[in-house]
Amino acid sequence: MTDQTSNAGAVRPQTSKAEKSGLFGLRGKDASLLILVAILTLCAPFILNPFPEGSAMAQFNAGYPDLMQRFVIFGIFAIGFNILFGLTGYLSFGHAAFLGVGSYAGIWSMKLLTLNVIPSILVSIVVAGLFSLIVGWISLRRSGIYFSILTLAFAMMSFALAYSVLTPITGGETGLQLKYFDPRILDGALAEGTTPRANLFGLEMGTSYELAVGNWLFTFNAGYYIAAICMLAAFYLSIRIFRSPFGMMLRAVKSNQQRLNYTGISPKPYTLAAFVISGMYAGLAGGLLVAMDTQVGAERMFWTASGEVVLMTILGGAGTLIGPVLGAGFIKYMENIVSTINKTTLEGWFAFMPDGLSDVFVTIVYPFVGKGWHLTLGLLFMAVVIFLPGGLVQGGQKLAAMFRRDKSGTGATKAAKE
Amino acid sequence: MTKSNFTRRGVLKTGAVAGAGLATPTIFTGAVWADAHSGFTNAPQGDTVTLGFNVPQSGPYADEGADELRAFELAVEHLNGGGDGGMLNTFSSKVLDGTGIMGKRVEFVTGDTQTKSDAARASARSMIEKDGAIMVSGGSSSGVAVAVQALCQEAGIIFMAGLTHSNDTTGKDKKANGFRHFFNSYMSGAALAPILAAQYGTDRKAYHLTADYNWGYTTEEAVRSSTEAQGWETVNSVLTPLTQTDFSSYIAPVLQSDADVLVLNHYGGNMVNSLTNAVQFGLRDRMVNGKKFEIVVPLYSELMARGAGENIAGILGSQNWDWKLENQLGAKYAGTNAFVQSFGTKYGFPPSQAAHTCYVQTLLYADAVTRAGSFNPCAVVEALEGFEFDGLGNGPTLYRADDHQCFKDVVVVRGKENPENEFDLVEIVEVTPVDQVTYAPDHPQFAGGSLGTCNPGA
Amino acid sequence: MEAIILQVLNGLDKGSAYALIALGLTLIFGTLGVVNFAHGALFMLGAFCAVTFSRLIQVSHTVIDETQKDFLGNPLKVDVPYIYDFFGQAAGDVMIDWAVPLSILMAIPVMIGIGVLMERGLIKHFYKRPHADQILVTFGLAIVLQEIIKYFYGANPIPTPAPDALVGSFDFGVMLGFDPGGIVYPYWRLVYFLFAAIVIAAVFAFLQFTTFGMVVRAGMADRETVTLLGIDIDKRFTIMFGLAAAVAGLAGVMYTPINSPNYHMGMDFLVLSFVVVVVGGMGSLPGAVLAGFLLGIIEAFASMPEVLNVLPGINQIIIYLVAIVVLLTRPRGLMGRKGVMED
């Protein structure tokens, strides 16, 4: 597979011997990207809630805990997927299985050990890592589409078994939830009838601090910030991997595996390592999902979920650092915001127009929102890939280029676009 | 600063303070609101109250979800005093007067469950955290119902289940904040068995095809134990994958067995396909041991029956409600015609049972709030527990306190041989009275859960 | 014995659908090198050609019948199809009855048209793009096509019965000398199998025995050389795309009486058809057909109660298990060529 960024690594051989300077050993551009992402993530409750409460546009606010958590968690998932796909070009079509296995492991840790999220997340990562080691070891014997179908087959088997035969372990259709009578050997027993809640040394994930400024309401949620810190760590690690000799080797696998073979290097250990790392990222995402919302359903392992992370990565820009996060945010936003716009909401928006005109607008817009949100999603997929071959990141680059032209080339940072 | 597990957007949505805020930006912390607010999640502020209607809008159940949404919109219209009032006129409790709920106008938000438990919870959380919904209702599968019910328990709001038929919803996964009006697998089995025995005889050999997930298991168990009590024998039972579309390879072995009844424990798309395939293989014309071969579908869905077309002719099944009840069985089922009239006038076709249960659940919630005099979930739970009512289309009904399940008559229906139109596909065979479908709260098919205590949230 | 023969028949029948879809998919891989995630949607569009056709010939004008009442007590409106006015009631009824087979006549031009339009309008621009981009754009297209169908036809399955003469089943076993009632098989499923066999044979004959097919095959093997010979291979490949779309569409048309079509039936088949193509081996037409029938038969056997008693749940995973075993023992599937979609 060719990719617009496949040569990016090759022309930058100095990265491998980059000095350990700057922020946590990152070079200038990467350091400023990390800082930018950190600022955006930490200020997300402000950025995602630009519209005042009660206004017609408040529908588009995304700054509530559930969606913010989903943004960063699926961001982690996509970052991890990109380490495999963006660097080695191996297209896994079964990554959701690792997310699902991680989730099941995490919730069992909360059922059997403790409600503290740290052991649960660690268990998720380890179990998903082990599962991806097995799947990767088998699937990486093949390449190209044969590899994709092998991973797909493993994921679909995981889904089918979790939904039906393994119901005693997975809860099947109704999923797994915490109960007050779960054993939890490290915690004291809960009072009868109480609801178990995931916590971090007593700080419950659902705890929120609300800040009201005028008509605006901003919610700072403990769970979100824990997930956000995980994402920043995951993002930092991914930059380090991209810039490391290991990352170079993975790019070499992508550009010409045969040449690698001729030089006497076996690519398998490298690709397997990348596969397991991205499986552990998926496990982290799965563990965080149950930490934020303590239930698991088997649907998160269905092939459409695996397809979703592929789409997130490509949509954002495969092989770029920030692309997958953008893609994840884009798809989750569509799923959670556009799907909730109903006819009543639309009538509210167009109420300022004369009666006949507003009806016309409602009729035109209605098929694309609410139950038609998939249509908008499909159209946007096509639009992005047709007009922005490099994904959303390229859109950002184009915008930045326009911006620079207007400002007659004042050195705006290009780091964010890498 | 407040420590709340779910935020209270309702606080700022409306109200006088919000208007003043723009001119002089002030920083409030949650403490200011804590006083104003009554100690439970999403307490309605101002003159409106927000309900969340979480229905499948994409995926195979999208049409069923659309019908549920129509019913919700109609219920809201009636609660706010619009339309002809529908079942408000026939409902035995008379506290609802068309001025919203406790004088607050009812508003609603909608979301897409996609018939996936994860997506349904995400959508419900957005309603609770973003839109300040005080009650969530809807849904078209038990997986979704159980997942959202648990969420509402955690969040401290009320969940009024939509279409969910698995025993687990009010069995091992029951929750204090969750209520189900729809009937369940056990009731289907108990209602069908005597009628099956009367129609087809007590000396029958049944072959079960069962959807390989929780709802399928509970339905098979219920039908099996009820029919075996009538003297039937179960010769085989085969689990079929959810994702199966062509059931031919599961139907063919039925021909090889000596079974003379096929029970299809399938719902929705699975049901349409397995029934269509069974009829293709000539099972309807088959004679075994001198008896005519019969097919049974424990849970009928009118919408999906439409997909099976003429294949449903003569097939017995059970329903929670049917729009012809009052016309055919008299005033005991009062409310049915009032609802059908207002639904039909607004949308041009009769409502499905999914629409009915969603409409009734909304009314029951509004009524419970008004009777309790509070939106506090614990007060609502108290008002609904043990509530006996009538005039909502099912005859006298009890919301049992032990498990938050409604107990009422179950309708046994048969696919019409010559339906006149696509909305009139089934005929009512009989109504099984409520005491035949009532079970003890500790019945083994419902074991393993506990309601817990009601949770008012923050 | 009867049970085994029945499952072989079932397998061949399932396999017919898999093989037809996979055949088109692999044609597009082989000729254009494009990963077409919209292929399931083409199957679905074919099925809705049948639905649309049977609705078109039943387009009616309304007559109010004062003698009957509808559910709200208003006078009943009765629909009279226009086709009665044109051909008389008897001929009209026959046409309505035979709507599904007749709709093939409509489906072939429509599907070829859609295929050519898709290729010229969209896919053409993606030949040189990475496979990932092809996946994204065709998946987007699949969603859009699906949602358009949902908008007009709803999400519910739509019953589309076979002609009355072909409804029901007949005793197949007696013809082979088994006891009566041993092997009873539905007419339409046999029709479907025969239909699939004819279409597959026709595609192979077209590629094998016509000059056009010869050039296409040469182009699949070595596109550059064929282009250097001065042949406009692109134009031929466009026609092949139309042909592949038509094959998928016909598979859909004829499938409607087996299972009522709905808007997401394409997605249900998409993953399976990819598995079939890959198990058959990339770039191999016979491989796709062989794998289709093979997986169909294996799936049928895995759902027998005797098998499930020994291995509960095997029906859930069998296809994927077989795919894994085949790909691990035969690196390029059953009949794959070296170097196709391996990088």
Image (tube, coloured by chain):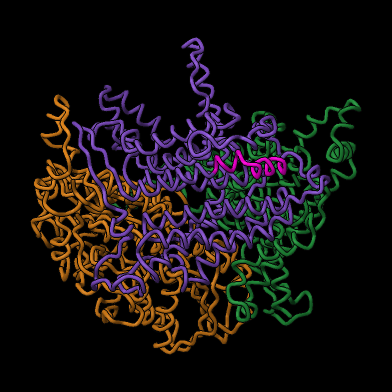
Chain colours: A purple, B orange, C green
Looking at the image, residue B55 lies above or below residue C62: below
Q: Answer with the quarter of the image where residue B10 lies.
A: top left
Looking at the image, residue B427 lies above or below residue A312: below
Q: Answer with the quarter of the image where residue B161 lies.
A: bottom left
Q: Residue at left 29%, top 69%?
A: B174
Q: Quadrant of the N terminus of chain A?
A: top right
Residue farthest along the top direction in this orientation:
A408
Q: Nearer the viewer, residue C18 or A25?
A: A25
Residue A385, horizontal then vertical, whole percent? 58, 32
Q: Is residue B174 visible?
A: yes
The answer to if A246 sits in the magenta stretch is: yes
Q: Main secondary structure of the magenta part?
A: helix
Residue B210 located left or right of residue A153: left
Task: Report how many numbered discs are placed on residues in the image.
Answer: 0
Q: Is residue C73 visible?
A: no
Residue A77, horizontal then vertical, whole percent? 51, 48
Instruction: Give, as a single range, the part of the protein colored magenta.
Output: A238-254
Q: Answer with the quarter of the image where residue A289 lies.
A: bottom left
Residue C169 located left or right of residue B193: right
Q: Quadrant of the C terminus of chain A?
A: top right
Looking at the image, residue B72 lies above or below residue B357: above
Residue B98, horizontal then vertical, whole percent? 12, 48
Q: Nearer the viewer, residue A1 or B247?
A: A1
Q: Residue at left 87%, top 37%?
A: C222
Q: Nearer the viewer, residue B170 or A82?
A: A82
Residue C1, horizontal then vertical, whole percent? 74, 80
Q: Residue at left 31%, top 43%?
A: A64
The answer to if A271 sits in the magenta stretch is: no
Q: Nearer the viewer, residue B48 or B73?
A: B48
